[in-house]
Image (tube, helix red, strand yellow):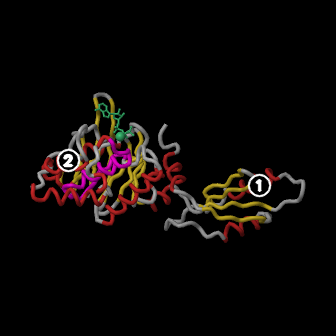
Amino acid sequence: MIELTNLSKSFGQHIALQAVTLTIGEGECFGFIGPNGAGKSTTMKILAGLLTPTTGSAKVCGRSVITEPDAVRPLIGYMPDFLGVYEDLTVDEYLQFFASAFLIPRAKRRSTVDGVLQLVDLTDKRDAMVDSLSRGMQQRLGVARVLLHDPKVLLLDEPASGLDPRARIELRELILELRRMGKTLMVSSHILSELAEMTTSLGIIEKGRMLFAGSVEEAFRKANIGDRIEVKLELEPGSDVRGHHMAMAERLRRDERIAGAEFADGTLLVDLAATAEGGGHSHHFLIAAILEAGGRIAAFTPRSVKLEDAFLRLTKGALN
Ligand SMILES: Nc1ncnc2c1ncn2[C@@H]1O[C@H](COP(=O)(O)OP(=O)(O)OP(=O)(O)O)[C@@H](O)[C@H]1O
Ligand SMILES: [Mg+2]
């Protein structure tokens, strides 16, 4: 549904995007992660036809956003990072205004606006002034606006920024609902955890370069992340706890099935490497390896690894 090939954008001397290549399939929810100035908004604006790339191509449903903008426009809904100020307009008037701008026939406008209001759960606020809405409601109104012409692809630029935890959960529910409706989504954020649980794939961009793009499973695999296990060794009273654990960590690190081992907070933290299939290695070999090295296990506690850990590994040292 979205295909970027070697997309670059410069503003004068400044390179905002550098040869970005990316494919997003139908029904995917692509989380677009990167710090301030990474190039997220620039990418989305190019897709929305608001910026022309310096080089490269950008396609939506196989149509070029550069040479066929009129064909692309009905296919996409772009929500910019802030809504803008609309004084003296009610929620209903605001949506009616955009419905007419999107050339939705007058006879269909009422039912279209009612439909999107219901979807974003703002029916009760239809007569409220836009300026009086909370940030979370304004973000939902922004989503309602981009749904008016029923586009296949939605580009949401930082919809979760500035939302409290409750509003964030509501937004997540809304995004999951859009996924169920079969929409393809590109959602940007600074923070991975804002998007966890709603994305099917993710891209990490920094300084205009795509560091990683792929499925969530691939992110784990590429970061070489399997399971993490906390191990405590049983030691003689009075022995050097730190020294013993450090020595064990040192030995374990030599095993290729182990991605990392370190001593922290009184326990040994062992990261199992991911297998070729993307899962973790079984835990049994670790028990055997510890026993073989002369260790006695006092505690053995598997911990789940978060997507954030994968993110940190994928970005660590990639840029300087
Ligand atoms: N119109 C412009 N003129 C000059 N430079 C620009 C323009 N728009 C963006 N830039 C620069 O391009 C780079 C990428 O900006 P962009 O807005 O795409 O980042 P972003 O990832 O959306 O960041 P943020 O998280 O702050 O929204 C930045 O260095 C920015 O200063
Ligand atoms: Mg931005």
The mark lying in front, picked from 1 and 2, is 2
What are the residue bounds of the magenta stretch? 132-158
> Looking at the picture, how far across and down is residue 251, in whole percent?
72, 57
Question: Is residue 136 rendered magenta in the image?
Answer: yes
Does residue 286 sit above or below 130 in this rendering? Answer: below
Residue furthest out toward the top: 13
- Residue 196 seen in the current view: yes
Left or right for 204, reference 254: left
> Looking at the picture, how far across and down is residue 66, in whole percent?
17, 45
Q: Identify the image quadrant of the N terminus.
A: bottom left
Ligand 1 sits in which quadrant?
A: top left
Q: Quadrant of residue 122?
A: bottom left
> Looking at the picture, how far across and down is residue 11, in whole percent?
28, 31
Identify the amino acid type marked 1. Answer: His
Give the SS element for disc 2: helix
Q: Which residue is mark 1?
A: 245
In-front residue for pair 149/50 = 149
Give the SS element for disc 1: helix
Q: Earlier in the sequence, mark 1 or mark 2?
A: 2
Mark 1 to mark 2: distance in Å? 67 Å
Identify the amino acid type marked 2. Answer: Glu
> Looking at the picture, how far across and down is residue 68, in whole percent?
13, 49
Q: Quadrant of residue 3?
A: bottom left
Q: Which residue is mark 2?
A: 93
